[in-house]
Amino acid sequence: MLWILSVIAGLGLLGFLLGRGRAVASAGGDVRLLHSLPTYYGLNVTLLTMVPAVLVLGIWLIIQPIVINNAVTASLPADYLAQTDNPALVMTEVRRLASGFDVAVERGLFTNPEVATLDVTDDTIRDQLAGIGVALGADVSTEVLAAAQQFRVLAVTGRTWMLVVVFALAVAGLGYAFLRTNKDQRARNSVERAILGILIAASTLAILTTVGIVLSMLWDTRNFFQLYPWQDFFFGLEWRPSFEGGSELGLIPLLWGTMYISFIALLVAAPIGLFAAIYMAEYASGRVRSVAKPLIEVLAGIPTIVYGLFALITVGPMLRDYFAQPLGLGDSSSSVMTAGIVMGIMLIPFVSSLSDDIINAVPQSLRDGSYGLGATRSETIKQVILPAALPGIVGAVLLAASRAIGETMIVVLGAGAAARLDLNPFEAMTTVTVKIVGQLTGDTDFSSPEALVAFALGLTLFVITLCLNIVALVVVRKYREQYD
């Protein structure tokens, strides 16, 4: 793909130079006679060269796997598919075998003609592919081998036609735009319309992605509730999944753990982050701010798995040895308090940066007026600045809560995986996100409620975070101060 995009970009650059040169030449070298700046003529040719080609390339890459998958599935014998519990697993094995053949050809184990003539009498196929790091789930059957060979042929044919169509479209766009270029062409208008279209397409793509995520979760959640009663899910007090049957899939213990850990995280992050923001905005000198603010924001760049390890080997044992065991509240290093404190540390730069920006947005005239009336700095902060910035601060805290609810790795390593209803903060608990990962890890049967419950959990989490974000936006818009 890299060299395909590089060639298209090269054609676009060539089109820019040719279009710009043709426009200047049509004006006899006097750019004052051009309708638009020379750059616009070059950009017009570049856009007509690259945009249609890249658009077709993207659509082709999305549609081709679907077409090939359907064609190969249709070619598999019906009696063979009837013998399998899940036809989708058959296609997974076919794609894995086809990818294995591609790797084998790249490393010289086979040639393309040899792959096309292989048959199952060569019982070393699986061992040979395993030798280059391609693991197959079972011995290669006649049907799977034939399907994998067909898959490779269709993939090569599709790639060939893709290259032909994409490059032909790029060259045609270059030629068409180049021939239309002249000094009277309204190139600026065309370029601005094209850029507007690209911006609209980008925003539409983001919206459609969100809609696609929601629809996919809704579909599988619907399948889950056809297999498991929704009353038992939303109001159940036990979480005991079992792929052998008799599962208890109650949401309440997971939701309790999620809210409990998030609440402790906010108790840590909100005051520390807000106090840090007040110091940075109102008390710190320019030199201190230039050093301290980046150091605080470094916390935002630390991977969550590192925070999880910090919770596992440092914070958890410390809380157990100095608080939980002396107080008789537990003897486990995995606890709600461990995950909550470390998650709160992770959220400090989030709350601090947003609050700092909001406090700095309060006009200086309000501070000057307060000082002019004889108020001290601390009184000004308490009675003028914080009330003016309060809606934004509340919005920052609510957005931090959304971030806390969706965290996974810190909870896995810091709070354990026990789904329970308990008020003891030094007991191990778990969250919705952890159980989503757990239910979709390993060999998963997506026809069972134990696997499909992950989508119901995901949809529930999506609704909760969406509501928090909406509340944050409403608070900010309703109570924010407007300054001239």
Image: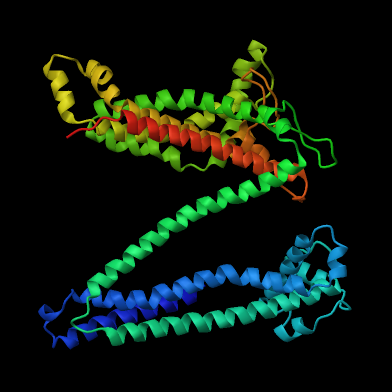
**Residue at the top extreme of this rendering:** 327
Residue drawn at x 65%, y 28% is 334
Residue drawn at x 36%, y 35% is 354
Residue drawn at x 13%, y 88% is 28
- Residue 144 vertical placement versus 463 (above, below): below
Residue 400 position within the rendered picture, expressed as x and y whole percent measured from the top left: 46, 33
Viewer-side residue, 32 vs 294: 32
Viewer-side residue, 106 vs 170: 170
Viewer-side residue, 328 vs 479: 479
- Residue 383 vertical placement versus 460 (above, below): above
Give the quarter of the image for residue 170: bottom left
Residue drawn at x 75%, y 69% is 94
Residue 245 position within the rendered picture, expressed as x and y whole percent measured from the top left: 84, 39
Is residue 257 in view? yes
Give the quarter of the image for residue 98: bottom right
Left or right: 33, with 271 as reference point: left
Is residue 132 in view? no
Residue 372 position within the rendered picture, expressed as x and y whole percent measured from the top left: 11, 18
- Residue 150 vertical placement versus 59 (above, below): below
User: Number of marks in the image?
Assistant: 0
Residue 25 position within the rendered picture, expressed as x and y whole percent measured from the top left: 18, 87
